[in-house]
Amino acid sequence: MLRFVILLILITQSVQTDDVLKKLQDRFNSIDNFTADFKFTSPAMNINGKFIYKKRNKFVIESEARKIVSDSKSVWNYDINGKRVMISDIGDEPSSFSIERYLFDLPQKCNVRNYRDKKGKIYLELQPKSEEDFKKIIIETSDDLFRKIEITDFNGEKHIIELNNIKTDVKLKEEIFTFVPPKGIRIIDLR
């Protein structure tokens, strides 16, 4: 009887986790794009700025000192103060931020569970089944897709991306996902 109760609890938890993940994936699939204010915090830096995201890994990240643009194939990482831009393939660029990866690709490669905090917020926790480039990812879910992603790297350091003032399905011009280097900057093409 005890084994049956434990099995029932495990099945119920699995269904709930699948439901939370599916709800988040469905919400993401229901929109074309979004804009948000972002805050990135890590042991080495704190950055605030604007984040624009369109499906299929097109994005623009703007802060005072940096602008990162992706057309889904290449990433332009523009150091405004250093007057240089590094161009790389999206898969090779550590500054690229693929929401599709966090919501669709990684859950298939991870053990996924969900939990609630004391305030009722729901979190998804992803722990890799085999070697990945992180130890753990925690995604704080909300009606606006998600609000926060906390990535714990192999050194135990936390990198946190917070999104606020999320606006979905805004009118965006396709040209914003192509970077045109200003005159007089150094171009480093790593593609």
Image: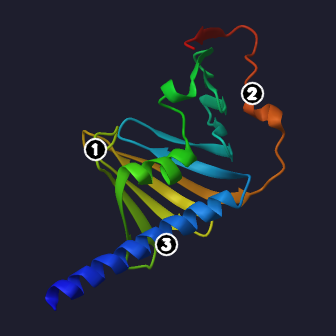
Residue position marked by numbered label 1 in the rendering: 130
Query: Where does the image place residue 40, in percent across and percent down from the top left?
Result: 49, 45
C-alpha gap between disc 3 and disc 1:
24 Å
- Mark 3 or 2 closer to N-term? 3
Q: Is residue 16 above or below residue 103?
A: below
Say which element carries label 3. helix
Q: Residue at x 49, y 72 (%)?
A: 19
Q: Based on the displayed image, in which of its 4 quarters is residue 44 positioned?
A: top left
The amino acid on which the numbered mark 1 sits, given as a three-letter code, is: Ser
Query: Residue 45 vs residue 96: left or right?
Result: left
Contact (Cβ within 8 Å) of mark 3 with mark 1 = no
SS class of the residue under badge 1? loop
State the SS at label 2.
Answer: loop
Of circles 3 and 2, which is in front?
A: 3
The image quarter containing residue 26 is: bottom right
Q: Is residue 99 above or below residue 112?
A: above
Q: CA distance from mark 3 to mark 2?
A: 36 Å
> Could you tell which of marks 3 and 1 lies nearer the N-terminus?
3
The residue at 21%/86% (across/down) is 4
**Residue drawn 61% across and 70% down?**
143
Mark 2 or mark 1, which is nearer the start of the sequence? 1
The answer, for residue 150, to whether it is visible in the render is no
| Any part of residue 27 in sight | yes
Q: Which residue is mark 3?
A: 19
Counting from the top left corner in percent of width and height, residue 138 is at 39, 57
